Amino acid sequence: MAWVPEDRAPRQHEETAIARPNGLMIVYTGAGKGKTTAALGLVFRALGRRYRVAMVQFIKGKWKTGEAAMAKELTGRIDFFSLGDGFTWITKNYDQDVASARTAWAKCLELLTDERYQVVIFDELNYVLKYNFLSVEEVLSGLKRKPRRTHVVITGRDAPPELIEAADLVTEMRQIKHPYQAGIKAQPGVDY
């Protein structure tokens, strides 16, 4: 008698999703790598649907990243704003970090209410909340201004509980193994 594999595919399940025209608030958080990468994957998908996208980076301002280079090639489809001064331990100036975060948040609010965009990405926003450069209350109040069909993606470690509660989708990246632990530095095209 021949071996017949057991069918384990989820063929019978209840449809629970509700179709709604509202944009989602999506949070990618956690200690593992991949938060910005996940947001950029969503950008790729949105661009495939001919959506207009805007992205604001709060921290990586001084880095020459692959995503910034690619955004230049997609001018008119994605608007990319790298407004940070670098990691806070580089600037060592709290007042400057707060001012940079406020400038970036003002750009976020401008983009958030611009109905040309179907997707807006606020990369590393969770860090400025953790470091108290912006208040969670102020950010949540601003997020309420978005047009109902706009999707918002927020990335960074340590998403505050209030933001997690307000979000429609939260994914936590968990680090299991990282090349940095073996002394391998960040790699272009993979990490930035």
Image: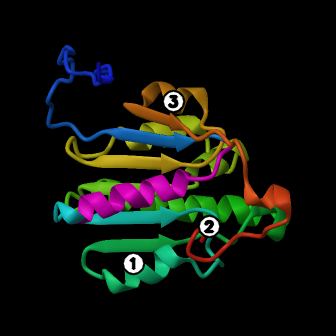
Image quarter of the C terminus = bottom right
Q: Which segment is the magenta one?
A: 31-47
Residue assigned mark 3: 164
At 25% from the left edge and 48% from the top edge, which residue is drawn? 150
The reply to whether discs 1 and 2 touch (Cβ–Cβ < 8 Å) is no
Label 2 sits on what residue type? Answer: Asp
At 47% from the left edge and 83% from the top edge, which residue is drawn? 69
The reply to whether the magenta stretch includes residue 109 is no
Q: If you read the primary sequence from the N terminus, does the residue marked by circle 2 or circle 3 appear first?
A: 3
| Residue 71 image label | 1
Label 1 sits on what residue type? Answer: Ala
Label 3 sits on what residue type? Answer: Ile
Does 19 sit above or below residue 54?
A: above
Residue assigned mark 2: 191
Local packing at callout 3 (Cα closer than 10 Å; few below 14, some 14-19, many 20+) is some
Q: If you read the primary sequence from the N terminus, does the residue marked by circle 1 or circle 2 appear first?
A: 1
Furthest-front residue in this view:
1
